[in-house]
Each structure stands twice: as C-alpha cells, then as structure tokens.
Amino acid sequence: MKTEEFIVQLHEELELEVPLNEDTNLKDLEEWDSMAAMIVIGFVSNNFNVILNANDIQNITTISSLIDRVGRDKFN
Amino acid sequence: MYQSFTGITIDGIASCVPKNIVSNDIFSDLLSPKEMKMFEKTVGIKERRWASDEIAASDLGYRAALELFADPQFDKDKIKCLIFVSQTSDYKIPFTSNILQSRLGLASDILCLDINAGCAGFIQGLSTAYATANSMEEGSVLLIIAETLSKILSPDDRSTTMLFGDAASAIIISRKLETSVQTYLNFFSDGKNHDAIQIPEGGFRNKAGSNPPNLKLVMDGSRVFDFTLREISASIIDLINYSKQSIENIDYLFLHQSNAFIINQILGQLGVLKAQGPINIQSFGNTSGVSIPLLITTNKDIFQDKSVKILCSGYGSGLTWGNAILDINAGTILKNLIEY
C-alpha cells in the first residue's frame, strides 16, 4: 500500500469531514476518541500485521508519526 | 495453569435474560449521533438487557436452572454440588449458592460454593465444576453464572455504562464413565493490574473511602484493551499446543463478548474465519462471565445432532484470562433462551 492510499482509506474508515494528510495531527481531529483509536488499531493490524498498543496511541500525533510507527519500509 | 479432564461432559445449558431491553437511544446525552455510529461500528453493541430493581442476579440464575430441571433428563436430587459465579450476589453474608440450594429444592447433602469472578468466570467456574465432578462417585454439578452489572454502573460514565448487560446461565456437568471425551483448560493472572476493572470502595480495603462511597464499576479501558489484544490469542495457541491439536480441529471459537472489535482482532490474530467466531454482543452487551454460555444458547443450532469441538476464551477483571477446549456432544440439552 502506498502512503497516499493509506491516508485515503484511513480517512474513509474514520468517516472524517475534514481532509487528512501526513501533517494532520490525529489528536486535533474533532472525531478523535477511543473509538477512533480502535479504528486506527484495526486498520493498521488488518493491513500491516502491526498491533499498536495504548502507548503507541498515546505517542502518535501526526499521520506521519503513525506511518513511522507502522514502519515506512512497509509502504511501497 | 493447565488442566485436562477425561470423561467429564456438559449435559445441559439454559440461559435467562431480563425482559427489559435497553437500546442505545437512552444514551443520547452521553454520545453525539456520530459518536454513537462509531460506537456501534467498533464496540458493536446496539442493545442490552437490564434487570428491574426487584430482580437480582440469582433470580435470573434460578429461572435458568428451573428451565433445565423442566427437562425429564435432569433430576434435582442428583445435584451434589452447586457453584454460583457472580460479582453481584444477593448479600455479603451469606453466600448465594446456599440460598439457591433451598429455592431450587436441591438435596441437603450438597456442596455449595460461591465464586467471585468476572469475565473469565465461565472458564473459572468450569474448572471448579469439572474438578469436582471428576472426584464424585455419582451425581452432577450445577454451575450457575449470573450477573446484574447494570446495578453497579454509573449512568454518566460513558466508559462503562453502555457496555454491560444482565444475564444468567445454568449448566449441568457430570462424569460419564462410558466416554473418553477430553477437555483442556488453561489460566493466567495479572494481579498487579487488579485496579484496571474495579469497584474502588465498599469492600474491606477501602471501607471508609469517600462520602458517599464509590460503589460503581470503574474501568481503565485502554489498559484492558491492550491486555486483550496482547495476551488472549497467545494463550489460546498455548492451550491448543498443550492439547496436541491444531486450530483446524476447532469447529468454533466462543469468545467472551466484550467488544466486537476485540473479538474480530483475536479471530484475525488466530487466522480463523469470522464465521467461526459467533457474536451476539449487538443484542446483549457484555454480560461478564455469562457471555460464553449465553452465546452457546443463542447459537444452539450449531450443535444440532452432532458433536462440535469448541474453544471458549474468557478475559477481564483480575486481570485474569482462561481458555477451554471442549466438546458439546449431540446429547447435550441446549434450551431456548428464556426471559424473566
């Protein structure tokens, strides 16, 4: 998956009203809550086989930092 | 801890839920419409059953047990052990199983035990029931799991109040000399995280506490969430290895109904099909230790006229988690769900 596709699909999963890009801080989104975190964990787990934990969720800020945590090498 | 049993079977299961259906609509003050949509999409709960003020958990358990005894196959006089698993028992003193012995009209030469256990309560109760049945010359064990968690929820705590429902199941277990059916169980505990799911006051540790005392359930959702995603599938694989079987031998996985997202993640981690992991959380919420036998009741068609190998996994307060691999054979009496 390319990072662009990742962002588009995550945008759909989270049903966001505002656009999403690598610099968007997830924590600043009006929609960000524990259920949105669950959707992010599920999306990452299903697509990359990486299981984010509560610490990861706490540390992740921007989409870029989420991609770093998943591992940039996993994107093509 | 790992256990194996030979020739112990579940002879019947009946489950009872309160009549009163509580849909998500009543929580509209706690969640916006969009948050509600996400809650239903992730956690998966659309409604749950809450008992009215005058119905205690043991009343639901009593009804479930009566439903079993209505079947001519079961004889009350053969029950020589009654185990009651609950966190919402009738009194602090005495223990509820002894009260149920009399209400159900069971014989007086009987061992009555209460177990205070949460979401792993079915597996913990099963371990105790199987071990007891294994040591009995004759007779059966009646295991009743009953919860009315609605009575310990704080109505404005959005991290708990929407999650839990009330229910009870009654299960009869006995030793069968003529069968060699094998059952395997394993258990794990992490007591250092005991405060991740807790009623902080009202016991004898913090009996003074605040005024008024905090007698409602408090949950650190992210800690519980993390633990289930980290520990459960690994513990299931451990039990499958211990039983010298492979996951392909398991027909269905009956996972504790805590959260649809978590259930699907665990199924995914194990590489099994979603269809192998039945779900009823949409209708009943998290009913703690009752959730697995309630799930068996609402999926009783799976077991029609054949022996089915299932893996059950319970996980929650303690923190504690445990699994069981067992056979529900064609002769097991599975009653339709009843309401009270």
Image (cartoon, coloured by chain):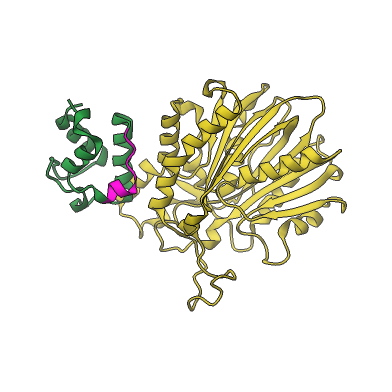
Horizontal and vertical percent for residue B311?
57, 32
Q: Is residue B70 visible?
A: no
* Up/down of B334 relative to B118, above or below: above
* Up/down of B193 relative to B68, above or below: below
Residue depicted at 37% across the width and 42% down the height: B42
* Up/down of B112 relative to B239, above or below: below
Q: Is residue A48 visible?
A: yes
In the picture, residue B40 is in which quadrant? top left
Q: Quadrant of the N terminus of chain B?
A: top right
Q: Is B51 placed left or right of B193 in the picture?
A: right
Horizontal and vertical percent for residue B164?
50, 52
Residue depicted at 44% across the width and 54% down the height: B162
Figure label count: 0
Q: Is B122 placed left or right of B37 in the picture?
A: right
Say which of B276 and B301 sits in front: B276
Q: Which residues are magenta?
A: A50-58
Horizontal and vertical percent for residue B63?
70, 49
Say which of A70 and B173 sits in front: A70
Chain represented in yellow: B
* Up/down of A57 relative to B266, above or below: below
In the picture, residue B295 is in which quadrant? top right
Q: Is B120 placed left or right of B181 in the picture?
A: left
| Residue B158 included in the magenta stretch of the image | no
Chain represented in green: A
Residue depicted at 75% across the width and 46% down the height: B66
